[in-house]
Image (cartoon, grey):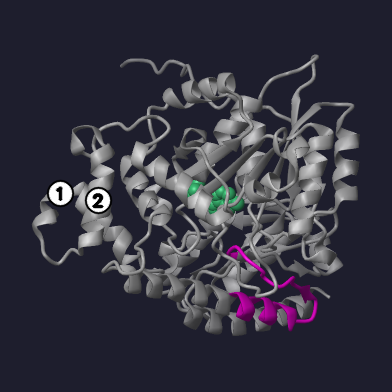
Amino acid sequence: MALKEEAVLTVDTMNSNVKEMQYAVRGPIVGLAAEVESELENGQDKPFKEVVRANIGDCHATGQHPLTFLRQVLALTVYPDLFKDPNFPEDAKLRANLVLDSCKGRSVGSYSESSGLKNVRKHIAEFIERRDGYQADMNHVFTSTGASEGIKTILHLLNCDIDGKKPGVMIPIPQYPLYSATLVEYAMPQIQYYLDEENHWSLDMAEMQRAIDEARSTCNPRAVVVINPGNPTGQVLSRQNIESIIKFAHKERLVILADEVYQHNVYDPACEFHSFKKVLTEMGPEISANVQLASFMSISKGYMGECGLRAGYFEVVNFDEKLLMQLNKCISVKLCPPVTGQAALECVVNPPREGEPSYELHEKEKAEVLDGLKAKAKLVSSTFNAIDGISCNNIQGAMYCFPQVQIPKKAIEYTQSNLYKVGVDEIKITPDEFYCFELLKKTGLCVVPGSGFKQREGTYHFRCTILPEKEKFDVVMEKFKKFHTEFLAEWQ
Ligand SMILES: Cc1ncc(COP(=O)(O)O)c(C=O)c1O
């Protein structure tokens, strides 16, 4: 019998950065949700009938219907025999043709240019021009495998030690964990700046100054990440706030990474989305000609919610030709983002126009999604706010809220001296994890503990999406109120 040799690659000999990396959105809470679901399937008696997944911003997974026009164009590009079908509207055929005209061999099965199909990039640039009222250069636009990959590409470019110091990146706290995870993976220092919870999670410039001043002794600050509208915090930044950040980036010589994937998701009538590109362009030549910006967009969010098609784009500003060449080289190693995703992206940046056959239905479907999200944003934040011991900023935009919850001292102490059973494992957990795990077990509502997004020491939060269907929320929110009251009574 052959003896088993020691494997070359084991957890002891793998990349330690990967081991250190954490990604809360798919953390232990997801394992627990699956466990509870299988208990329900096996007929275990529980005070709820299903798990309501409010843990991840995956719109279609929580019941949102795909947009007809987008899926028609996708179907036509994938299976061109459908061009003969008279049920497909002419404008869908026109868009599908535009995509196929850019594909080698007129097939989405061929590689595209690494930066993306020419027609798609041209229409992205036109979309940005219509949005901002200023010129956009398609050679400064790159499609990507979701916004995530674009963000990782730019962080990768920034990863350079200067004068023996590592490159630091300013990230908001709380933040979307792609940033903290990628920085750990690339061994780049995180410079954490806290958002102002008392002020609608806005960016406080004094706090940003504190963060960068403290970091200078240990690293070389090179970039600042801003998420607008915010995940997990649901705020929409004012134009004044954006101007202050741009001035700060200019003064401190930082590249701005503007994560604008929720640009279509603004619900509060008092708020408006202002793109960093537009505000930067309007700030006078000393700033607009110098501050470097990369802004990111995705088809996973907005009214499209096409997370699984994996497509997005980024636009870079004030990147010189030599840097653009290096950026092109860097992405060319990955060949290209999925071409089917690029076809879907085409529909977002070049939607049906007034007078075209698909226009009315497309506008109706888009409004239905956004109106539904707006109504749920109000329902969710007002329900949380009405509960003693929970405070929640209004959801101005994006798809989440991040309520603060007062966890009794006794419950905190319990987590410090006890392990928690998840599946076959017994794990050490934080007080907010304890709260969320118990919530899931007693109500079926699955939310993500705040510690996964980071939060001010001594405060506890959770992130709840506004995506589940309203009928499900109505039921689960009633259960939530009862759970919270009982949790306080048990641990007070
Ligand atoms: C703020 C933010 N940026 C980026 C992403 C990644 O999006 P994509 O699916 O396009 O990679 C997400 C996904 O939830 C997000 O919330």
* Rendered view: 352 above or below 183: below
Helix, strand or loop for disc 1: helix
Q: Is mark 1 within 8 Å of ligand 1?
A: no
Name which quarter of the figure residue 354 lies in: bottom left
* Rendered view: 152 above or below 238: above
Find out whether residue 288 is within the magenta segment.
Answer: no
Question: Residue 400 location in percent, x, y?
Answer: 62, 65
Q: Quadrant of the C terminus?
A: bottom right
Badges 1 and 2: C-beta atoms under 8 Å apart? Answer: yes
Kindly identify the residue that appears in the image at 78 percent across and 73 percent down. 391
Instruction: Name the residue that disc number 2 marks.
Output: 96
Kindly identify the residue that appears in the image at 74 percent across and 84 percent down. 386
Instruction: Report whether residue 47 is seen.
Output: yes
* Circle number at residue 80: 1
Q: Residues within 10 Å of mark 2 (few under 14, many from 20)?
A: many
Left or right placement of residue 401 versus residue 459 in this view? left
Magenta part of the chain: 377-399
Amino acid type of the residue that numbered disc 2 sits on in the rendered structure: Ala
Question: Residue 46 location in percent, x, y?
Answer: 51, 78
Of residues 89 and 226, the one drawn nearer to the viewer in this rendering: 89
